Image (tube, helix red, strand yellow):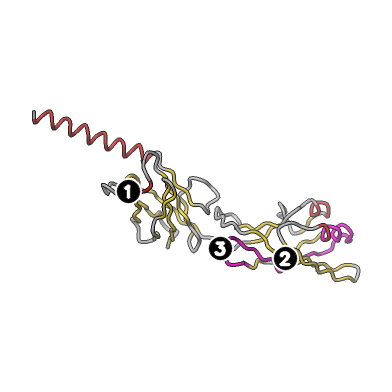
Amino acid sequence: MIRMKQIILLALLVLICKEGYAKGDSLFVRNLYCSKADTALVFEDGTNVIEIYVPGMKGSDLKLKSMDKSLRIADIKLKGDTITTWAMPYTTSHKMRLAVMDKKTNRIIKNIDFTGAKIPEPIARIGNLKDTAVDKRELLNQTAIFFEYPNSLYSLPYRIAEYRFTAHYSGKDISLPATGVFIPVEIKKIIKEMPANTKVTFTDIVATCPECNPRQLGDIKILVR
């Protein structure tokens, strides 16, 4: 009888462990401000909103614990069965562990290894232009100015809010303000009329995003051949 109880108990333990591994294997995690989905990446000095979902478990039954002093997390917020927290890494030199745990049993469902990354200075970019000297037709084909963090997956949703277009040719000084991301018809008309080898500048570029402070970006200087 005792032997039978031991076998039943062992079977239950195995079942519980298998359930834990299955949940861990199918766990979904993402940083809302990382452009690559399902990537355990956090950005130093950035905004990191981590969402975690474990199929088969209620979000209210989950809790998080940072296993590394280099990764601090805020209180958990619940949205359906998805839990959300703000995270702040203090290093990019090694991976940082975040434990997803069963609140009732304190059992670790899975340790998530986060990698830290630095955020480059943001820039403004005209359409898909990469060169500082372009043909007039190529510049006219561009429709908008974009905000970007070069060579980074950081994707805080900034958009260009305003800028000024300046140029000098044929003894004339041109200075036109513009709002929004698009390049207006008035500016394109000037570009179309200007002679070859005219230098133009997009300056006073300001970008904004919801719940963010406005950011002033560097000038874009282009030689129009």
Q: In percent of the image, x 33 and y 47: which residue is there?
A: 61
Identity, as a three-letter code, of the amino acid under mark 1: Met
Residue 122 lies in the magenta stretch: no
Kindly indicate the quadrant of the structure image that contains residue 211.
bottom right
Give the magenta-colored segment's residue range: 187-215
* Nearer the camera: disc 1 or disc 3: 3
- Between discs 1 and 2, the one toward the N terminus: 1
Label 2 Cα crowd, 10 Å radius (few <14 / some 14-19 / many 20+): many
Label 1 Cα crowd, 10 Å radius (few <14 / some 14-19 / many 20+): some
Give the residue furthest to the front: 80
The foreground one among 61 and 21 is: 61
| Residue 101, disc | 1
Q: In percent of the image, x 67 and y 56: which residue is there?
A: 146
Label 3 Cα crowd, 10 Å radius (few <14 / some 14-19 / many 20+): few
Q: Which residue is mark 2?
A: 163
Identity, as a three-letter code, of the amino acid under mark 2: Tyr
Q: In percent of the image, x 77 and y 57: which residue is there?
A: 183
How far, Cα to Cα, is label 1 from label 2? 48 Å
| Residue 32, image x, y percentages | 51, 52
The foreground one among 155 and 102 is: 102
Looking at the rendered structure, the secondary structure element under dot 3 is loop
Kindly indicate the quadrant of the structure image that contains residue 225.
bottom right
Q: Is residue 52 left or right of residue 7?
A: right
- Quadrant of the rendering where the N terminus is positioned: top left
- Between discs 1 and 3, the one toward the N terminus: 1
How far, Cα to Cα, is label 3 from label 2? 21 Å
* Nearer the camera: disc 3 or disc 2: 3
Q: Which residue is mark 3?
A: 211
| Residue 197, image x, y percentages | 85, 61
